[in-house]
Amino acid sequence: MNKKELKDPIEEVWALFKETDKRFKETDERLDKRFEKTDERFKQDFEEVAERFKETDKEIKKLTKNIGGLSGKWGKFVEGLVAPGTIRMFKERGIEVKETYTRADSIRNGKRMEIDVLAVNEEYVVAIEVKSTLTVEAVNEYLKDLQRFKQFFPHFKDRKIIGAVAGIVIDENADRYAYHKGLFVIGQTGETVNILNDEKFEPKVW
């Protein structure tokens, strides 16, 4: 065996080792580039999501502000228009109420009922429900309350209970529906509020 025969296998192994090491380095470089691209895409996606969250947060804040404004308008509508106008409105319909109460609250057997405005005399109690938007569904819910009214306000059990609904906004047909269910409908006309039912209307008595 000569030296060349001994050297060639070692050189071949060494050359193979260097080639393998080179391939590992090339693979690492390719993986690094891929990870860089992946990381860049991830950062872009994250930034897009963050931007969307900012926009959503702005919309939520705007909606909350609008709801708060509507709530303020509702309170003003009840306390500034409906309640003060109640005596006048029902006197014009032949029902002379003497006292008005806002947000009358009653709890019986763990259940609660709140009436936005109560107008009272010796014979009648007019119970008024006020909505920011008056809908048919809201009318139906209020009719259920009127059926249970004397359970929650038993000191009025000997009075005639008459129902009325008022709305800042009144959905189409909600006023007609309430009318046919025997309820007075109150709406804003100009700077004041008035009963919208015609003169031939006969209210239901509970």
Image (cartoon, rainbow, N blue to C red):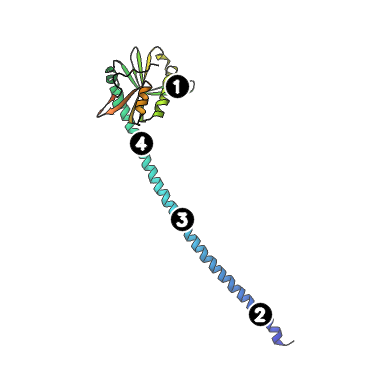
Which of discs 3 and 4 lies nearer the camera? The answer is: 3
Identify the amino acid type marked 2: Glu
Q: Position of residue 13 (x, y in %)?
A: 66, 78
- Dot 3 or dot 1: first in sequence order is 3
Q: Which mark is residue 68?
A: 4
Q: Position of residue 143 (x, y in %)?
A: 41, 23
Q: Looking at this view, is 174 or 97 the one in front?
A: 174
Q: Position of residue 51 (x, y in %)?
A: 41, 52
- Residue at the spot of label 1: 107
Which of discs 2 and 3 lies nearer the camera? The answer is: 3
Q: Residue at x 63, y 75 (%)?
A: 17
Q: In which quarter of the view is residue 98 placed? A: top left
Q: CA distance from mark 1 to mark 4?
A: 27 Å
Q: Looking at this view, is 112 or 95 the one in front?
A: 95
For label 2, the crowd category at 10 Å Cα-Cα, with few meaning under 14, some 14 to 19 and many 20 or more, is: few
Q: Which mark is residue 45?
A: 3
Quarter of the image that includes the C terminus:
top left
Q: Which type of secondary structure does the marked residue at label 2 adopt? A: helix
Q: CA distance from mark 2 to mark 4?
A: 82 Å
Q: Residue at x 56, y 71 (%)?
A: 26
